[in-house]
Image: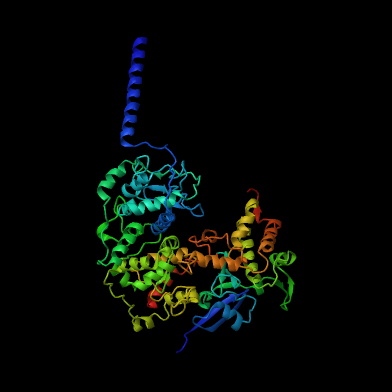
Amino acid sequence: MRVRRRRTFLIAAAIAIAAVAAAAFAMRNLLSGRTGGPMQVVSAPPDVVARGKYLAEAADCAACHTAPGGTPLAGGLPMPSGYGTIYATNITPDPDNGIGRWSADDFWRALHDGVRRDGQQLYPAMPYTSYRGMTRADADAIYAYLMQMRPMKVANRRTELNFPFNIRLGMAGWNLLFLHDSLPAVSVGSSPAWQRGRYLVNVLGHCGECHTPRGIVGEMELSRSFTGFALGRVAAPDITPAGLAARGWTAAALVAFLGRGLARQGSAFGDMHPVIMLSTRNLTPADLDAVATYLLGDSPPAPTSLAAPDPAEVAADANGAGRISYVALCAGCHGLEGNGMPNTVVAMRNNSTLRLADPRNLIVAMLDGIGAENFPHRQHASDAWLRRQAKRRRGGRARELSARHLGRGEGRRDSGCRASLALRPCGLTDALEGTTALGY
Amino acid sequence: MTIPIRPLTVTINGRQHGPMDVPEGLMMIDVLHEMLGLTGSRLGCGIGICHACVVIWDRDDQTSEEVRTCITGAGFFDGKRIRTIEGTAQTDERGEIVALSPVQQAFLDQFSFQCGYCTPGFVNAATVLVERLKRAPVPRGEVQATVAAALETHICRCTGYVRYYQAVRDVILTTPGLTRDGT
């Protein structure tokens, strides 16, 4: 009896050991398992680092890899989804928390294949689905730029996904189905500017990750590229050439919007504001033109001007609840005629958000407010210009100042007001009716 | 071009005004200043940022909130009850002030303001807060944060806010029933 029990125990132990060994063997083969390794020392020429910085801004790494109020590129931004919450990671060269031990090949694999250095699959919250089209030279330049940053000891937060999405290996199958070498063109063109724009928009800017509808397992529905999708509370609107033209957008207006955050058609709010602050406003004029050229195509469709409202309809609604609510709650800033105030309050007339067929963003703007946001007054400010400004402000003690001290690229130069212009939800439906009645 | 005229009836500091004819699109602060002679509410920025122009809107459910009169059309107030800075202190039958409100007195005692332009707005914000705490007291440990949250949108260019916030905190901590134990 006793011998038998011991034998049972031995068999159980043997099975357990075999299982552990098999698991280890599988792990070793499936995953590279590399978590240690030497700290990488990267020496790249300054022009490569500078190009890497420009490309990292064009690829808008900071929008996700920086937590609100957190250290730049040290990760931490929570990205909630229907599957759970994913936290952006630390991509400073810290050896234990960041990418300090990553080689250029490791970095390339993450951008191109969606695979981490330890062999685990990334989730497509990291837009490798778009970055896959990046050239190796550009990826290496971004790598060179990141590796010369100051390493930040900021621990990553664990991904909180529900079963079965917490099994990273499942993403390998997802990638087989949905990871494509290039994303379809959203407009017709062939000019050099269009080609460059396609790369900036489809690959670096990864615009489609928000503006393309997503399917049932979170994949981009490429047949409906750029037709708009509500990933968050504010929906990313249709930015196909037809969609843009239908709301009055021209190439010049897109350049103004992406360069400054402000155009006659409206201001950037919601998730688009950080895109402009961190990314598109840093693009060169030539690249901004290329983006606009690609978005609208080599032969841009004519912008649709707003049809004049039917006077009979307006007259009939002269005493309607909608008009009365608009006059009481909105007109104080946006104006009785909906013209807004230059550089302060956007116009409602011809406003791109109001011209969307789906009133979602308008309703969200009224319920939540859009907050007080700063817009860059001057793009492409040279370091020399910034130093002159600093000198003027600091009485000549400017020699040690660089653009970084002035917070260039972080929007700190414009410390605007802090008050929110949020409206209260009272009279919301009426106000909505009002905007229609006034023909905006 | 003719400007449409709309009737306005509004109860201000307990007294009904109107019905009177008001041009559509006129902001409430203009009605207070130009038509009713109530000049205590201040027009500061005119775009809803500084909050010097706020009045207290008393809802029927006994709650109150601040409304910026520089960006809110007069039509919004039709049929509503509001209080302006002129109605804050106690007055006798001849309209003479006999006692300041605790908030007003505290602002004076603590030298909260210098030029005073923002003061009507601060008085109204603090009054709304004190009344809210009477209905729903906060733990003593949260008073500082509560005051900061309630006054945050009000802008003052003279004093740096410290004495305003200090005065409101003192009113809350020394008035029975506005706080409860705890942090």
Seen in the picture, residue A46 relative to B98 is either above or below; the reply is above
Q: Is residue B27 visible?
A: yes
Extreme residue in the bottom direction = B1
Seen in the picture, residue A178 relative to A224 is either above or below; the reply is above
Q: Looking at the picture, how far across and down is residue A71, in whole percent? A: 50, 52
Q: How many marks?
A: 0
Query: In which quadrant is the C terminus of chain A drawn?
Result: bottom left
Q: Looking at the picture, how far across and down is residue A282, in whole percent? A: 43, 63
- At horizontal 65% and vertical 49% (from top left) the residue drawn is B181
Rendering quarter of residue B42? bottom right
Q: Is residue A362 visible?
A: no
Compared across the picture, whether A94 is left or right of A165 comes to right
Q: Looking at the picture, how far across and down is residue A55, in whole percent? A: 39, 57
Rendering quarter of residue B83? bottom right
Seen in the picture, residue A399 relative to B94 is either above or below; the reply is above
Compared across the picture, whether B76 is left or right of A238 comes to right
Q: Relative to the observer, which residue lies in front, B166 or A125?
A: A125
Q: How is the image coloured?
A: rainbow
Rendering quarter of residue A438? bottom left
Q: Relative to the observer, which residue lies in front, A363 or A274?
A: A274
- At horizontal 26% and vertical 60% (from top left) the residue drawn is A224
Query: In which quadrant is the N terminus of chain A drawn?
Result: top left
Q: Relative to the observer, which residue lies in front, A299 or A123?
A: A299
Q: Looking at the picture, how far across and down is residue B72, in whole percent? A: 52, 74
Compared across the picture, whether A12 is left or right of B40 comes to left
